[in-house]
Amino acid sequence: MPAVSICTDPFVLTAGAMARNYGFPGFEYVTIPHPVASLSTAQIRDRVRGMLPDLLRILGVE
Amino acid sequence: MDPSVDAAGIRQAMEYYADQGWTDGLPVVPVTESYLAEFLARTDRDPADVLLAMPHLNRALTVRLAAINAALAGCRPEYFPVVLAAWESLATEGYPARAIWQSTTGTAPFLIVNGPVRAQIGLNSRGNVFGSGFRANATIGRAIRLGVINAFGLRPHELDQATQGTPAKYAACIAENEEQSPWPPLHAEFGLAAADSAVTALTIRSCVHIEARHTMVPEQLAADIAGTIARTGALVHETTSAAVVLSPEHARLFSAGGWDKPGIRQFLYDHAVLTQAELVAAGKEALSSRTRWRLPADHPDALPYAGDSGDSGTIRVLNSPGAVLVVVAGAANAGVSAVVETFGPRGGPPPVVRIPGG
């Protein structure tokens, strides 16, 4: 199943390290601003809307 | 030192190791095959045996890697059976294999050593037990940290995502002060003979100081300790867990009142409580439907409030008396103890691992 990883900005270094560890140094994923845990439902929806173009691009949706 | 000996070669090796990132920030001891063999000679186990695996990282720590990192850490070869038992205990405890060492929480492995091995290798169980000054404590604890860094690659800012971490991430290894304890030691409480030697590893978040020189009443001292266990800052999940490290003076106070370790655990289970108002004030009165982490009742993920679990409208922060361990350590010189805030066990037995030949 096609999938896209999403992480917030502070985890970019770790995401890169995990990708290198699995042998995919150029693995592409979506980054969004931090934090997420304290957002309201409306703010979460905004985050999702904001990242959708990136998600679709990485999935290869034309 | 003989002035004709030039230490430049040693410094060069130490700098090389530091440049490779094979360190916690402090200098490490250079390791050669002949020195490694002295460590491996201390165990019957195959150097290729896996002690702890992290499948999500495709990495595993073998006996050989444990020995290399023990040597790097400054252990003497005779410490190695303790290091091996510590790794086995960490594997049995379960949290490390589930990636807890990569968590933003920033936990550290904490080792409690029991039995005759303490005296044999000079482990400190008395004054300054959480502090510095004792090679066996310092380097056995550090052997685990260096294994975490070098075998699993859990370096800060990379795969170790700790927000702040804890000073215990350099080294955290104590011995129980069995000689000045009125009760059976930890390993005997969980099925081993007192004459055995053992290591018990716990995943800890912090080590909180208890200053209680004011009372000779066991209930007051126990209530003081319960208040620290119940602090809201530690309560991320529905319940918490702890290892209470009592100084010999506090242990004697309890013992003189007829209390034993199970009695203290039961009292702490009953009295480590918060009121609903205290939880509401901290925004931790409800549980997440997904994670069962604590959050405010008006959070979209919040489950309906489940009700009181303790006496008179209070909420217990421990799920059972087994969520608290009690050990005795430190000098017999003051009413000072500590609550070591752990991740589990929450009712199950702690991972007490016997040291072969110990």
Image (cartoon, grey):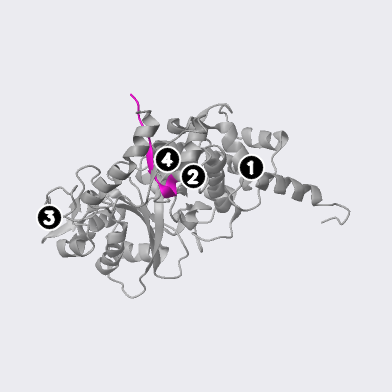
Asked whether, in this view, residue B155 is left or right of residue B298, the answer is: right
Q: Most extreme residue toward the front, as rendered?
A: A62
Query: Vertical placement of B188 versus B269: above or below?
Result: above
Q: CA distance from mark 4 to mark 3?
A: 33 Å
Sooner in the amino-acid sequence: mark 3 or mark 1:
1
Which segment is the magenta one?
A1-11
Which is more foreground, mark 3 or mark 2?
A: 2
Residue at the image point whose x is 59% and y is 48% from the top? B121
Mark 3: secondary structure: loop
Q: Most extreme residue toward the right, as rendered?
A: B4
Sooner in the amino-acid sequence: mark 4 or mark 3:
4
**Residue identifier under label 3:** B308
- Residue type highlighted by circle 1: Ala
Residue at the image point whose x is 28% and y is 43% from the top? A49
Q: Residues within 10 Å of mark 4 (few under 14, many from 20)?
A: many
Query: Vertical placement of B49 versus B135: above or below?
Result: above
Q: Are marks 3 and 2 on the same chain?
A: no
Q: Residues within 10 Å of mark 1 (few under 14, many from 20)?
A: many
- Residue type highlighted by circle 2: Leu
Residue at the image point whose x is 44% and y is 40% from the top? B90
Work out whether residue B82 can be spotted. Answer: no
Query: Mark number for residue B96?
Result: 4
**Residue identifier under label 1:** B71
- Residue type highlighted by circle 3: Asp
Query: Mark number for residue A13?
Result: 2
Query: Vertical placement of B229 versus B346: above or below?
Result: below
Quadrant, the N terminus of chain B: bottom right
Q: Are marks 2 and 4 on the same chain?
A: no
Residue at the image point whose x is 25% and y is 51% from the top? A43
Which is more foreground, mark 1 or mark 4?
A: 4
